[in-house]
Image: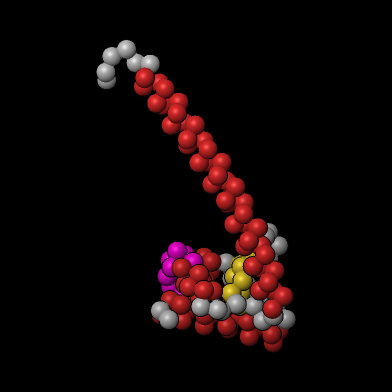
């Protein structure tokens, strides 16, 4: 585990403990988490991904009501978060497919425009 991963996990564990004791919904935005562990947001994102792949129940939400990252304490939260991530991935795949079609169409148009030229450039 990298020092950044350890620091992220420590902050999230502290927030989870605070939530358990006080009932406070302990979430930090990625920017707040980056400030807390003194690194970049990108490093926090990489640490979160690595920790998730290692089996840590780190959830996130970008909804307007309770945005942030947190260490889940129950299976239902983890499963709900996995479902949100899956829906997001499907939307990204649909967008990727549309961009590929657009790129191929543009390539055909560019090739046709080059063939119409009466002299070489």
Seen in the picture, residue 107 relative to 41 is either above or below; the reply is: above
- Which residue does the image show at 42% across and 22% down from the upper left? 112
Q: Is residue 84 visible?
A: yes
Residue at x-position 59% and y-position 74%: 58
Q: Quadrant of residue 109?
A: top left
How far from the left and from the top, in percent, is residue 105?
49, 31
Q: Nearer the viewer, residue 113 or 47?
A: 113
Residue 26 rendering spot, x and y as whole percentages: 64, 76
Residue 20 drawn above or below residue 70: below
Quadrant the N terminus occupies: bottom left
Choose top left, top right, bottom left or bottom right for residue 82.
Answer: bottom right
For this view, does 19 lie left or right of residue 102?
Answer: right
Residue 22, placed above or below residue 36? below
Say if 110 sits above or below 16 in the image.
Answer: above
Residue range corresponding to the magenta coloring: 37-45
Classify residue 18 by image quadrant.
Answer: bottom right
Does residue 34 appear in the picture of this structure?
no
Q: Residue 114, how many percent across, how many down?
A: 36, 22
Quarter of the picture holding the C terminus: top left
Q: Residue at x 38, y 16 (%)?
A: 116
* Residue at 39% in and 26% down: 111
The colouring scheme, among rainbow, by chain, secondary structure or one colour, is: secondary structure
Q: Nearer the viewer, residue 16 or 119?
A: 119
Total number of numbered discs in the rendering = 0
Q: Position of residue 93 (x, y in %)?
A: 57, 51
Characterize the magenta stretch by its predominant secondary structure: helix
Q: Is residue 37 left or right of residue 86?
A: left
Residue 109 forms part of the magenta stretch = no
| Direction from residue 76 to residue 32 in the image, left or right | left
Indicate yes or no whether the magenta region holds residue 40: yes
């Amino acid at each position: 585990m990298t020092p950044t991963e350890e620091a992220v996990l420590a902050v999230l564990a502290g927030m989870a403990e605070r939530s358990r004791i006080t009932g406070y919904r302990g979430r930090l935005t990625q920017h707040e988490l980056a400030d807390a562990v003194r690194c970049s947001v990108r490093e926090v994102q990489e640490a979160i991904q690595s920790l998730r792949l290692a089996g840590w129940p780190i959830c996130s939400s970008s909804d307007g009501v309770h945005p942030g990252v947190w260490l889940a304490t129950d299976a239902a939260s983890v499963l709900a978060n996995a479902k949100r991530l899956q829906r997001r991935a499907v939307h990204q795949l649909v967008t990727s497919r549309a961009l590929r079609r657009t790129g191929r169409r543009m390539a055909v148009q560019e090739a046709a425009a080059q063939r119409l030229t009466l002299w070489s450039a």
